[in-house]
Amino acid sequence: MPAEQPDDPTGPVERELDAIVIGAGPAGEVAAGKLAGGGLEVALIERHLVGGECSYYACMPSKALLRPAEILHEARRVAGAAQAVRGELDVPAVLARRDEVIHHRDDSAQLPWLEERSIELLRGHARIVGERAVRVGDTLLRARRAIVLATGSVAAIPPVPGLREAAPWTNREATTAEQIPGSLLILGGGVVGVEMASAYASLGAHVTLVEAAQRLIGGEEPWVSELVAQALRERGVRLLLGAKAAAVKRADADGPIAMTLEDATELQSDELLVATGRRPLSDDLGLETVGIDPGGYVHVDSQLRAGGHDWLYVVGDLNGKALLTHMGKHQARSAAAAILGHPLETSPAGEVVPRVIFTDPQVAAVGHTLASAREAGLQVREARVSLQANAGSTYVGHDADGCVSILVDEQRRVIVGASFVGVEVAEGLHAATVAIVAQVPLALLAQAVPSFPVRTEFWLGLLEEAGRA
């Protein structure tokens, strides 16, 4: 009898489990944990580090780089503390703390969590090889109930001549760099671009940011973009908006990078960070074996199932719905609940996406922007007030720019979007998220009294403004 071919899904089944999760980032971990907690036998497959992009190359290290300057700036706004703060940031200490946060890119601390839940971890690249079948190296697995794909995304490199050959940084190199370059050129003014511009400027680099659009963070409100741009300029970041890269060149591996813009402007820096978006890791998953085109985001239905299959779920960045860690984790909880036979209750408001940008000032937003609300056919009114217009800002964010707004659906008199910009506003976003998800009427929301003297008193001003004709 001939030996089984390596990619032959019809050969003998080597292993059978209830569920197989491919990708051990935050979404994959949550899915595996919930399924195991529901009594299923689960295999979790990862080819790099358990914990994924967020833990080692994105959310966690970037915030470790940003937080020291944020604290320093706030201390300098407070009399008494300002006099005690005499020096500048200790850059080696910041980088050392960053390394502690990401466990020096060692995932061994993650493994006991899996072991406690009897989740089997397999290291290697996984490919679907047929219905409910996955191959990892020489091991063939078959899932009795479900396969969950949670492979995430990686930085996209745009087709600028010479860019790829210049070996630019992506978020991975930017968040794990061992030294701060004298100058950093950033291509892209989205979330990664503005956060890394803020971080590297605070750590001593001369930063230039090139953005093709006429404003930064184009998915947020225009006034939000203006406040972030103003803050970056005040910290010495050179912003080139409405500028497009035409060519990039690096003469040698250790040399500077030169960029030519479409208007013939020449730029040079020690390093170049590409922050122009993400692409899904779907091109080598074997999706074609189950009738799904590889290479792009994987379309899912309302239950997060793909390709019309009742056993194949896709969560996190891979489905392209919302490229945010917390949304991937939420999707993982939803998918696991569906697999276990008790789907989660959904909000009549639909999928509500909260998001935070950890610049200084911070940006925290949830739900619609004015543009997206109108595109959705909603009749909305914006209420906006200064964050300085309450007693709480005497103590937090004193003399720092800040503004907050809500979008009110005029027909239903509920909030459908909120945007906050200011010092440490991220922690206050959840109240707006709850109000939108639960569709709390403004009249009832007005009965939720904020404490004094905290900055969340801004809700009084927002609701008063929203109530005006």
Image (spheres, helix red, strand yellow):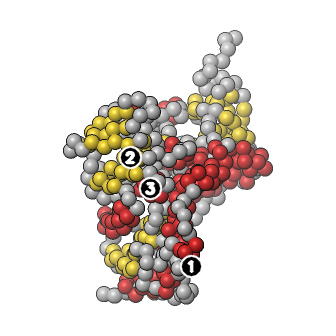
Distance from Cα at disc 1 to Cα at disc 2: 37 Å
Mark 1 vs mark 2: in front: 1
Using the rendered view, name the quadrant where residue 81 is placed. Answer: bottom right
In the drawing, what numbered circle is on residue 192?
Answer: none
Q: Residue at x 60, y 33 (%)?
A: 126
Q: Split into 4 quadrants, where in the image is the N terminus?
A: top right
Q: Earlier in the sequence, mark 1 or mark 2?
A: 1
Distance from Cα at disc 1 to Cα at disc 3: 26 Å
Q: Position of residue 110 (x, y in %)?
A: 71, 48
Closest to the observer: 399 or 87? 87
Q: Amino acid at mark 3?
A: Ala
Give the crowd class for mark 1: few <14, some 14-19, many >=20 residues within 10 Å: few
Q: Position of residue 101 (x, y in %)?
A: 64, 53
Q: Position of residue 4 (x, y in %)?
A: 66, 18
Q: Amino acid at mark 2?
A: Leu
Q: Is residue 313 visible?
A: no
Element type at mark 3 = helix
Q: Residue at x 51, y 35 (%)?
A: 287
In the drawing, what numbered circle is on residue 185?
Answer: 2
Q: Split into 4 quadrants, where in the image is the C terminus?
A: bottom left
Mark 1 vs mark 3: in front: 1
Distance from Cα at disc 2 to Cα at disc 3: 11 Å
Q: Amino acid at mark 1?
A: Gly
Q: How many marks?
A: 3
Element type at mark 2 = strand
Q: Which residue is mark 3?
A: 201
Image marks 1 and 2: residues in contact by CB distance under 8 Å: no
Q: Which residue is mark 1?
A: 80
Q: Residue at x 26, y 52 (%)?
A: 242
